[in-house]
Amino acid sequence: MPEPRFPRRKTRQLMVGSVPVGGDAPITVQSMTITKTADVDGTLAQIYALKAAGADIVRCTCNEREAAEGLAHIVPRSPVPIVADIHFHVEMALAAIEAGVDCLRLNPGNLRKTEEIRLVARECKDRGIPVRIGVNAGSLDPRLYKKYGGATPEALVESAQIELGLFAEEGFDDVKISVKASNVPLMIEAYRQLSEVTDHPLHLGVTEAGPPPAGTIKGTAGIGTLLSEGIGDTIRYSLTADPVEEAKAGRVLLESLGLRQRTNVDLIACPACGRAEIDVYKVAQEAQAALEGKQIPLQVAVMGCVVNGPGEARSADLGIAAGRHRGHLFIQGQIVRVVPEDEMVSALVEEAEKLVKEGVAARLAAADSGAAAEAEADRVALLDARGADANHSEQRVELIDRRLRDQP
Ligand code: SF4
């Protein structure tokens, strides 16, 4: 695990099945299935796909009797802990508990009867099942909406605190909290205020963020801002897309903030420019598709030219740069092989697999001894062909001089 760069706010810890949330536990990624929960095999297939994409915990709706029955079959076969999503009906909460779920999510805006909330708290306490109090700006308790004149940060926090108070009266405090909104500044402020008044673990999310890329950007703006302030113990992107995209986005966000050990490839690529010798977008996409799912925890670079590529991507574990219809394969900036252009992606994948298995020192030792000289020859030839100074700067400086001299 990389050194945490953001001091994390101290929270208490609870267990969602076998996964710790809060305290010093790694920040976890959540997502939600979009299948009918009664469709046991379809839901399990989606849960497995979510786990492969980076989800640590998965939520399924429990909105009807058939869904609760489905959960009874899903829970024992799921590779990750299962949270049942409960709105409106206390019976569904009780049924989900009987199904053996690892956590309940209750929406205080939709399940409002005090006695019902207390009943669920007592049952969860007896069975050792944690609860997420999932406040949502869009379904805020109307009484609070009226009191605050809208879904303000204060209203969202108060909603969570009222529910927390009822749980506390039942002696139940195995609780994590979310105060989600689709408005990013509102969501950020609500979580900031909440983190000041409770040490319960916080589940972060921008709700109803919409389809990617805008939805992903909104989620990242809200979740990333709070994580960088040390707030948040578990996260979920809410995207109008295949939920696998949510899990991926959560994993990539945590990896890019240094909050999660990389388990999959991080493909970087240059943006391409006039020097590019290949279609960078196409090769980068092919490389991403070929490497994804291979559990290769490396940063891999695809660079459009050999003139600047290996140097610019020196920090990558492995990379390939194009030049004169060939690919220069490099490890940490050092050229190890030169391959024909149409073998660039397959050579990259092969080298990535060997690098994971054998390590950097062994792969550098196995480098093709003539590769560096061949690569340098390509680089020099390209510089000669295009000029070291692609912008013709000396001529331009002369033009600038002339233009300024001619000014009245
Ligand atoms: S690596 Fe080469 S092609 Fe890519 S942006 Fe840099 S100079 Fe341009």
Image: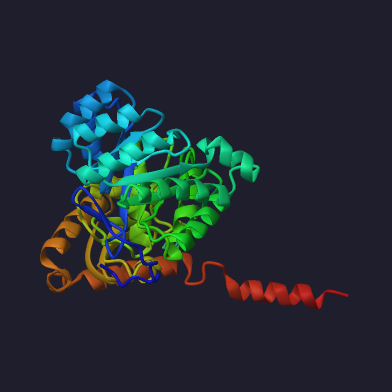
Residue 177 position in % (x across, y down): 40, 50
* Residue under the image location 49 percent in, 53 percent down: 222
Relative to residue 335, is residue 186 depicted above or below? above
In the image, 288 versus 325, the foreground residue is 288
Relative to residue 127, is residue 258 depicted above or below? below
> Residue 132 appears in which quarter of the rendering?
top left
Q: Quadrant of the N terminus?
A: bottom left
Is residue 197 something one can see in this rendering?
Answer: yes
In the image, 168 versus 24, the foreground residue is 168
Residue 302 position in % (x across, y down): 34, 57
Residue 316 position in % (x across, y down): 31, 66
Give the number of callouts.
0
In the image, 26 versus 164, the foreground residue is 164
Q: Quadrant of ligand 1?
A: bottom left
Q: Quadrant of the C terminus?
A: bottom right
Q: Which residue is the extreme one toward the right?
A: 408
Relative to residue 63, is residue 264 depicted above or below? below
Q: Left or right: where does residue 361 sit relative to residue 280?
A: left
Residue 307 position in % (x across, y down): 39, 68
